[in-house]
Image (cartoon, helix red, strand yellow):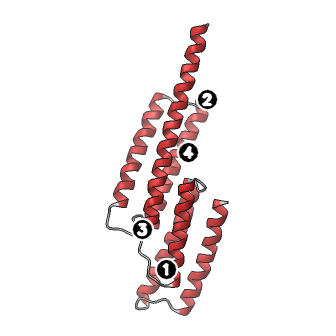
Amino acid sequence: MGKLIGGSLMALALAGMALAQVNVRRENQQDRIANGVSSGQLTAGETATLENKEGYINHEVATDRAANGGTLTGGEKAQINNQQNRLSNQIYTDKHNAATQHYGNNEVDARRENQQDRIAQGIRSGRLNAGQTARLENHEAAINHEVHTDRAANGGKLTPAEHAQVNRQLNRQSGRIYRAKH
């Protein structure tokens, strides 16, 4: 009986270590994403894609654990590790490609940059999960695309109506960031 209890305790300890390893790796990758957002190395679209993939992995881990009494099988651990390796490589590739998030020095661009900084801080602090971050970044990407398109159509400037519209969108996005973080 003592061997059975000792074996059970060892299995629980190993399961706890596997859980800790998965969580530490997830936190490390979230920090890398947050740093890429803050530095402008990751565009909003790249960040949304990365966070969608991170969210999928997190969901898979939760589903696998629920199906196995809170633990991951050896095969599931290997599969999650492979997925995290691919995500890690994509983070590196996206941070080191030619696509960067550029902001100008006007009011709209300053607000967009500030909101990216708020999202990065939420990722870094753990107040935003992968799903929340993906949704926020999808909104950011849409705003960025609209600003780019409007400027391209108007010689690099926003019309007063476009400026007002973008400000309304940024106000809504600011509220979304606040609600997601709190």
Quarter holding residue 36: bottom left
In the visual, does 69 lie left or right of 96?
Answer: right
Q: Which residue is mark 4?
A: 59
Amino acid found under the numbered disc labelled 4? His
Q: CA distance from mark 3 to mark 2?
A: 41 Å
Q: CA distance from mark 3 to mark 4?
A: 28 Å
Q: Which residue is mark 1?
A: 109
Which residue occupies 58% across, 11% down?
4
Q: CA distance from mark 1 to mark 4?
A: 34 Å
Q: Which residue is mark 3?
A: 40
Q: Residues within 10 Å of mark 2 (few under 14, many from 20)?
A: few
Mark 1 in CB contact with mark 3 (< 8 angstroms): no
Which residue occupies 58% across, 29% down?
68
Q: Which residue is mark 2?
A: 69
Marks 2 and 1: which is nearer the front?
1
What quarter of the picture does the C terminus occupy? bottom right
Q: Which structural element holds mark 1? A: helix
Q: Earlier in the sequence, mark 3 or mark 2?
A: 3
Q: Residues within 10 Å of mark 1 (few under 14, many from 20)?
A: some
Which residue occupies 65% across, 70% down?
175
